Amino acid sequence: MALRRLAWLMMSLFLVGLTYILLTTERSASKWEMTSKQTEDQRETLEKHVKQERNPESVVEPPKTHSAEERNPESAVELPKSHSAQERNPESVIGSPKKRDPEPIDPMNPLKGYVGVPDESKQLNMSCGVCAFVTGSGRMLNYKAGNEIDQADCVIRMNEGPVVGYEEQVGSKTTLRVMCFQTIYMVPMNATIFAGKSTLLGWGPLRDMDTEKGKAYQKLKELQISYPDLDVYKLTEDRMRYAESVFVKETGRPWKDSGTWLSTGWWTMMVAMEICDVIKVYGMTSDDFCKNHPNDQTFYHYFTGSKYPMEDYRECQYQKRDQNARGGGHRFLTEKAIFARWAPLNNITFLNPSWNP
């Protein structure tokens, strides 16, 4: 009896233990299944999220910055455009740096390098709307442009080109005169071109413009003393080097290989582009004019006479000779071709004779 009761008790304990094990296992399995399902759901959610990020169609991109071509004129408010050289209006220009080609020596101070004589602390300060750039060509005698030239805000002349006696053809007004070192010490001190209120700008190599021994510089000092109404300036070495570098950039040839002296026309055009909004050039032909007019006999200068050493020079022959010189000549035709390229960028027109680049 006692033995049967013990067997029954052991069987009961075995069944209770087995039930406990089964219940625990089922619960763990259920828990594991739930955990696995959650993990799988999370993984699917993550993969879906990653796929969305990688799909360019589902990505919300930040707004694009529209270019000028993409802007809708009706909805976009554009900033005011700066005037280019070709669009310059003398009435609307307010002292901002001019945008042009070639680039100025200093965008914020384009007249840097034009200094006073003898006071080099003084800098040229000149600004003009419309400029008449009067050459010394004999072609000036073919036109009675004097009144038209005098209507310009500023009249720029070169070297010893006289006014007295030629007013009908070249006008009577002079604002700025650009002279090379040779002309400076060649022209007499009492020449009428120095009388009256105007500005004289001299250029030349260091040996001639040296403040101690330069022959041309000493003459400029004397002129400043003798003519109080004449404002005298010169080009610094830095300004000379800058203008030469522009020529090199335009031609693509190293300066030492160019075999040229830049002409007074080059220096005059450079300063004109820096002080003028509109430039009207009188008497300058295109670089191919003489080629197309082989029999042209126009004199190099409109002024002739015994005191002018170039009275017998014909313009085409003289320019062709210098263009082909191995060294020491002016590359007139090359300079004219460069001026033609600059013309639409700097409001330059050519008159008497009229031609368009």
Image: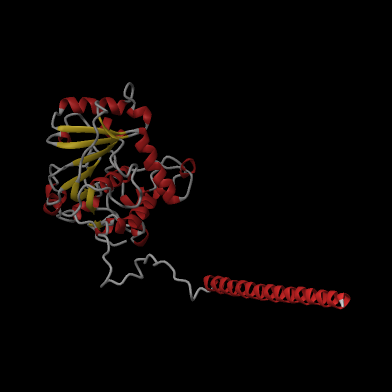
Above or below: residue 174 compared with residue 194: below
Query: For this rendering, which residue is in front, 102 or 78?
Result: 78
Judging from the image, the colouring scheme is: secondary structure
Report x, y in % for residue 228.
14, 28
Report x, y in % for residue 103.
35, 48
Query: For this rendering, which residue is in front, 2 or 157?
Result: 2
User: Which quadrant is home to the N terminus?
Assistant: bottom right
Residue found 18% across the figure and 53% down from its top:
90
Report x, y in % for residue 330.
38, 44
323 with respect to 115 (left or right): right
Quarter of the image where one finds residue 329: top left
Residue found 44% across the figure and 50% down from its top:
251
Query: For this rendering, which residue is in front, 97 or 224?
Result: 97
136 with respect to 337 (left or right): left
Report x, y in % for residue 47.
59, 72
151 with respect to 282 (left or right): left
User: Which quadrant is home to the C terminus?
Assistant: bottom left
Quarter of the image where one finds residue 108: top left
